[in-house]
Image: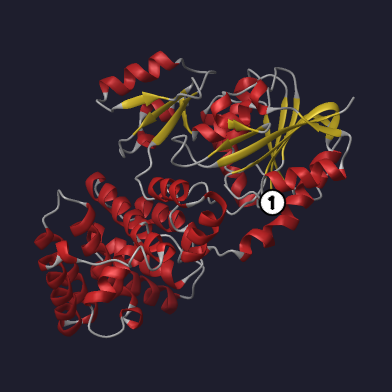
Amino acid sequence: MFEDLPSAERVSTQVKQTQEEFLYQGARGAAIRILSRFERSDSYLDKLLEHELRTGGLSHQDKALLTELVNGVTRWLSKLDWVLTGFYHGEFDKCMTPVKNAMRIALYQVMFLNKIPPAAAINESVEIIKRIKGEKSAGIVNAVLRNITRNIDNIRYPNQDEDMVWYLSVVYSHPKWMVKRWMDRWGLAFTEEILKSNVNRPSITLRVNGLLAERQEVESWLEEQHIPFTTSDYHTSSVLVSSLRDITNSDMFKSGKIAIQDVSASMAALLSQAKPGMSVIDLCSAPGGKAFYVAELMKNQGTIIALDKYEAKLRYLIEGAQRLGISILNAEVGDARSFEHDAVDLVLADVPCTGFGTLSKKPDIKWKRDADDISKLLPLQREILTNAARLVKPGGTLIYSTCTIEADENESNIQWFLNEYPDFTLDAAENYLPSDVCEQGFMKTIPGKHSTDGAFAARLIRKG
């Protein structure tokens, strides 16, 4: 990546990178660096983490610890900050970003990782800050953290009776606006269940690729690897594992016999009822999970155009299809709002959304988004739906799906669509999926209720 820089600048960049690698060495140092970059930029956490795991030269054990620390601190950010603010002398918010994150990762280990001795967790953060910011800052980190450990059982949180929203926001680490919005919609008990689910470590869901394997083969492999698993209550080809081992480096994954896909996403694809020989357009395809499963349902017979606006994302579609033994998928660059093509049997519109159904897996979303993002996304979602309608043959099917639990992005959009396009009708999801994941004709899953991500899907038929 340095080749395009002038010689002197290239050397300076390499020196800075070497210095940074020394200052932020090890899993904990890398965690501080990633969290600090996340806080100071618009970068998504998973991209920063993915880059570090690929290029950081960490052992498998350190990769696992790094992943745990980065996701764990982000998941519990407001609770950690509440505690640190109470013990920090001065304004914790104005503390230097690396120092804040050093304290956060140490406190996360103390509060949530009982296999790591508190003294070891604290010492690591102190030593890292000593290298980065010197003895004075390291002394502050040490004093604050040791004071917390001495008083860990006496920490007080906001008073439930005075402000329940504030209490839930801190204790379950969600933005106040989000907690209030959900309480106004669902009430206290149901909202608390969602919040609890969002701060749990997520399981990994493996979908058996029926083109190359059977479920028994995958389950036998998991047993041989001593990886605990359960089968999904809602989708027979999905297996849930809690282990955080590097599944993607396994022979089972590399050979294409399994894909990583949440049950809610698999069910949204299954709702399409795709059959061999169909013509399909997936308007917002990358990274391709739903298109891949649709190809499997089609027994790799027919055609799928997998569209994405950004050419750089096409490699995910191409590489994924090759790994899974799919030959009917053609990846194309195009804008889902204006893509033109002859009408086809099936159109998938898995539209950009707030992603509020995926907070256990992508905890950074709750800190990057705000309430205004919901209304800002609606015009884009409806533009995509409008174009999708043009691409469906008479008698054909349109699947609209999101990974959010917001009614504005889900039911309201479908109501708008049916009013605007009376030649389409809703085909009830209950006809194709377990009734427990369906409501009023839609597929709807909620974290804390279904052991899946929160998601929504509607099956719409164009009248013949």
Q: Report the label total.
A: 1
Q: Is residue 309 left or right of residue 223?
A: right
Q: Secondary structure at mark 1?
A: loop
93 w.r.t. 83: above or below: below
Q: Give the labeled residue for mark 1.
A: 309
Q: Residue 390: horizontal and vertical position, in percent?
A: 86, 40
Q: Residue at x 18, y 59 (%)?
A: 110
From the viewer's perspective, is residue 49 above or below residue 448?
below
409 left or right, relative to 71:
right
Residue 381, position in %: x, y? 72, 51
Kindly identify the residue that appears in the image at 20 percent across and 81 percent down.
137
- Give 208 or 232, whichever is nearer the viewer: 232
Q: Is residue 34 visible?
A: no
Quadrant of the rendered structure where residue 127 is? bottom left
Q: Residue furthest front?
A: 161
The spot of residue 412 in percent (x, y) is: 72, 48
Amino acid found under the numbered disc labelled 1: Lys
Q: From this view, report whether residue 200 is shown above or below residue 424.
A: below
- Image quarter of residue 398: top right
- In x, y percent, where is residue 395? 85, 25
Seen in the picture, residue 251 relative to 151 is either above or below; the reply is: above
The quarter of the picture where residue 268 lies is top right
- Circle 1 residues within 10 Å: few <14, some 14–19, many ≥20: some
Residue drawn at the location 22% of the way across and 46% of the way down: 61
Q: Can residue 98 be seen?
A: yes
